[in-house]
Amino acid sequence: MKVKKTKQERKDFLYGLLFASPWILGFLAFSVYPLLSSLYYSFTEFNAVTAPKWVGLENFIDVFRDPLVWKSLRNTLFMAFVSTPINLMVALLLACIVVRNFKGRGFVRTAFFLPSVIPMVAATMVWIWMFDPTYGYINNVLALFGISGPSWLLDARFTKWALVLMGTWNTGTTMLVCMAALQSVPQSYYESAEIDGAGVVKRFFYVTLPCVAHVIVYQAILSIINAFQYFQQVYIIVTANAGVKGGSAAGGPENSILMYPLYIFHNAFTYLKMGKASAMAWLLFLVVAVLTVVMTKVTKKVTEDAGGE
Amino acid sequence: MNILLAKKKGKDLLFYLLVVVLAIIFISPFMVMVLTAFKTNSDAFTIPVKLLPREWVLDNFPAAFAAIPYFKYMGNTIFITAMSVVGQLLVTPLVAYSLSKIHWKGADIISGLVMATMMIPITVTMVPLYKIYSKLGLTNTYVPLILPTFFGKAFYIVIVRQFFSGVPDSLIEAARIDGANHFICYGKIAMPLCKPVLTTIGIYAFLDAWSDYLYPLIFITRPEKYTLSLGLQQYMSEYSVDWARLMAAALVFVLPVVICFAIFQKNFVEGIATSGLKA
């Protein structure tokens, strides 16, 4: 009997491995190998043509001495710690709306989520058009209220706020996750709170928020991780400003939207400093890895504090 | 009593007002795209800017298609998208089945690794991938865009695994006692059950491949190989952008996605809601 069980186990192991093998192979080829060779490249000097040449820590020293690295890091931190909380609050507000039962709820949910499915290139281009200082809709709508709008994407003081504004449109996914969390709060909690005389605001802070806290914490850290990888929108804006693809070392006006990943991309494919790009990328990877570990730990803790799941 | 009722009505009215304003704000970028596509370019650049076209025109569409090899790019995009959907649909359920329904040592480790790979920044992997593909002479082909889809994407695997964990083990155990191996269980029991979730994966794969910008940007440099997402940028390479034409081109690019979203909205919502909560 015992022998038969091990035989079964061994068979299951082989089946399991076989069924999972495509992913395992892909993991080795598209994750492990690039990660390790990127680490190696970070200690070398090379472009796409020549072979990598070992230079020790030179790339890292270069990274720490490059003022643009610090500038791009500050820009990225702005996205992570200004844009993220705003997006979360917007997502939560939208979720609170669509979780209620009212006429036209389906349509409203679609409207809130629609911007998140529109391909990023197209959406970003529309935004560039809407941000046009003279002919764009945004400044023309502001003008109706007597406000003269800024040159959003051309004025270094406003570029990042334009990105923040853009970001609030893209909260559909977070909204859906928050909505699912809100729906999982038992109705009876609200009822007993109401009997105790708690108003809408009190109910939100003492019933709703504690019940969905673990989801919000998880989403917050996930959004920060995503902010560290915020790249495509700024690349599109920057190239649109510059004209031709990759035509300029641009980071927007006064490099105000030179995000850290954008600077990696420029180093790799515009300046062909692939060693330096790899060094920058590995530093980013370490930050993201730490955040990921924190995320899983914190979520576990918050879930346990809330009584477990 | 009447006052209370009136108060409630007032509150409802306020709520609806808020909702309507927000809904309008959220669809406005899309509306701007649509309305600009039907304006003449001079109309788009006339002060005061009007929301609706002064004169509705269709000229922007043929002009946009003629300005760049639009249909060639669309063909390229359709080819890549179709291959990606096939790849993801073939592999995702296979891996998810292994992680959820075959009880083997390693399933937990692999599941953890699947989650972890979702966090790896593409900026770390892009240089080595670029180097290896260019060494193999595969840049400016669609191999770098399509090949990874045949090895399963973490996000999709998580969704399907989540679905499978709702399927009772006893269904598969019973079949196994009757002598069926895992291939038969997979094909005869698991696959038919997971049709709805496969629809969800198919839609995600379609959207991801259709909208993908980063991979084409890295691996495709020859204009005749461009996808639509890259091609749109060509409208901006001139000194002044013909926004009406660009919006027309963007609208046609976006339309399949919006239609797909409208039809399969339910799958979307469920996929995101389940994966996000438990992840």
Image: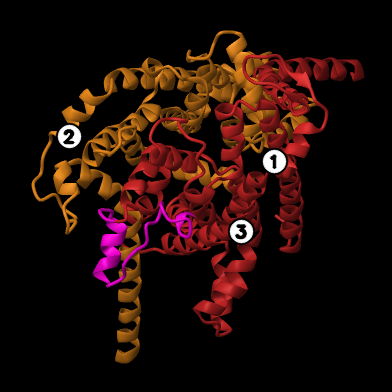
Chain colours: A red, B orange
Q: Are marks 3 and 2 on the same chain?
A: no
Q: Where is residue B45 in the image (x, y as percent from the top left)?
A: 19, 49
Q: Are marks 1 and 2 in contact (CB under 8 Å)?
A: no
- Which chain hosts label 3? A
Q: Which mark is residue A81?
A: 3
Q: How crowded is mark 2: few (under 14 residues within 10 Å), some or many (20 or more)?
A: many
How far is the residue under mark 3 from the one under mark 1? 16 Å
Q: Which sits in the foreground, A107 or A63?
A: A63
Residue at point 57%, 20% (across, down): B148
Tell me the quadrant of the picture where the C terminus of chain A can be found. bottom right
- Which chain hosts label 2? B
- The answer to whether residue A104 is visible is no
Identify the residue under disc 1: A284
Identify the residue under disc 2: B60
User: Looking at the image, is mark 3 or mark 1 earlier in the sequence?
Assistant: 3
Residue at point 59%, 56% (across, down): A78
Q: Where is residue B275 in the image (x, y as percent from the top left)?
A: 58, 43
Which residue extends farthest top? B136
Q: Is residue A150 magenta?
A: yes
Using the image, determine if residue A219 lies above or below residue A42: below
Magenta span covers which residues?
A: A134-159
Q: Are marks 3 and 1 on the same chain?
A: yes
In the shown orientation, is residue B279 left or right of residue A297? left
Q: Which sits in the foreground, B264 or B184?
A: B264
Q: How crowded is mark 1: few (under 14 residues within 10 Å), some or many (20 or more)?
A: many
- SS of the residue under disc 2: helix
| Dominant SS in magenta | loop
Residue at point 39%, 23% (across, down): B227
How far is the residue under mark 3 from the one under mark 2? 41 Å
Using the image, determine if residue B95 lies above or below residue B140: below
Q: Do labels 1 and 2 share a chain?
A: no
Task: Say what amino acid the circle numbered 1 marks.
Answer: Leu
